Structure formats: C-alpha cells, structure tokens
Amino acid sequence: MASYYASSSSSGEVTADHRDFPHVLAVDDNHVDRKIIETMLRNSSCRVTTVENGTRALEYLGLRDGQPNSATLVSSAGCQFPVMVILPSSYEIPMPIQQASKVNLVITDYCMPGMTGYELLKKIKGSSFLKEVPVVIVSSENVPTRINKCLEEGAKMFMLKPLKQSDVKKLRCHLLNCRS
C-alpha cells in the first residue's frame, strides 16, 4: 500500500505551501530503508509517497501493464462520472494524471523482488508521458557495470546505501532544477 505525506492544518486541509514542495516517489522493498529515505526527504521539505515495489510504483504512476486504467470524466457542469477504459495492454494512458504529473522524482532501490529498480527505470523512461521524470537508483552494492547500465538507460544518479543527508541535498538540488 502507498504511504503519502503532506502536512495539514488544524482543520485537516492540506496547506498550499506543502503542495508546492517537490513530490518524490520512493520505492524500496525494505520497510526500514523506505522510512529512512522518507524521513530524510521530509526533513528537506519534500512531499513523499512510498511504495514497496516496482509494480506498486507503476500503478501509482498510472502505468499498469495489461490492466485497464480507471478515470473520471468531468462534465461542463462539474459533475464527475467514473469510467473504465479498456485498451490493449500496449496502449498507455497517463492515469492518474493528478498523481503522475506531480511526481518530480522517483528514487528506487535496485535490488527488489519481482521487478528490479532497473526494470522500473526502463518502464518509466519508455513511457511517453513520464520519460522526463528524473529517476535515481540506490543500492547497497557498488557494482560498476550495474551503475553504468542504469546511467546509460537514463537514471539521473546512482547512489550507494546507506543514504546520508548530503545525498539528499544533492537530490534536492536536482529537484529544484527539474521542477517546471
């Protein structure tokens, strides 16, 4: 299940200032590692969504392989109508636009069961509407061929675990430069 972070006011409303913070999607199968990166990014004024694997990340970003994507149509009168769009598995719909368009960076562990961070990177970079989102790969293993492969495929950076606050500062610089 995805974990979302945003500060709220005493009335429960999300404050406008926090919606302006860069939004990072953090992907790691290890709960402790997810919490560490989430805390470090929050302390650097980022909104953070965490998921436990590449499949959940793709779902959050709206890239469900072979699965129908759901959407909401809004009439000119402002009424919302849920719809189910069923298309061939090769067809890609940028849903949910509200989530995907607001992710400023994806940070993912390399070694995860089911789908590696490298495979997730390839899917994001292969997407027509997400290819510009920076992806950072993290790993506890310093394997030069792995690092080069990820960078050649489009990763913005490759960082070694455990992440330090200085690493998060580097990420923050990329976020500020990449925000539109």
Image: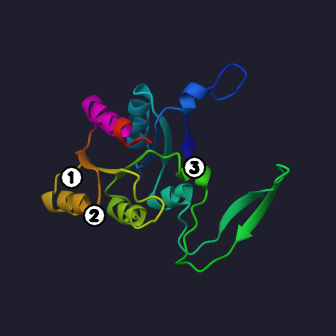
Residue 116 appears in which quarter of the rendering? Answer: bottom left
Q: Earlier in the sequence, mark 1 or mark 2?
A: 1
Tell me whether circle 1 and circle 2 mark residues in contact (CB < 8 Å): no
Q: Which residue is mark 1?
A: 141
Instruction: Tell me: residue 118, above or below residue 107.
Output: below
Q: Earlier in the sequence, mark 1 or mark 3?
A: 3
Characterize the magenta stretch by its predominant secondary structure.
helix
Q: Residues within 10 Å of mark 1 (few under 14, many from 20)?
A: few
Image location of residue 98, percent across then percent down = 61, 49
Q: Which residue is mark 3?
A: 99
Image location of residue 63, percent across then percent down = 53, 64
Looking at the rendered structure, which numbered label has been put on residue 153?
2
| Residue found at x 49% / y 46% | 103
58 on left or right of 171: right
- Label 3 sits on what residue type? Gln
125 on left or right of 149: right
Q: Considering the numbered disc 1 on the image, is that residue within a helix, a strand or a loop?
A: loop
46 on left or right of 10: left
Image location of residue 75, percent across then percent down = 81, 56
**Is 3 contained in the magenta span?**
no
Whole-angstrom CA distance, mark 3 to mark 2, is 24 Å
- The magenta stretch is 163-175
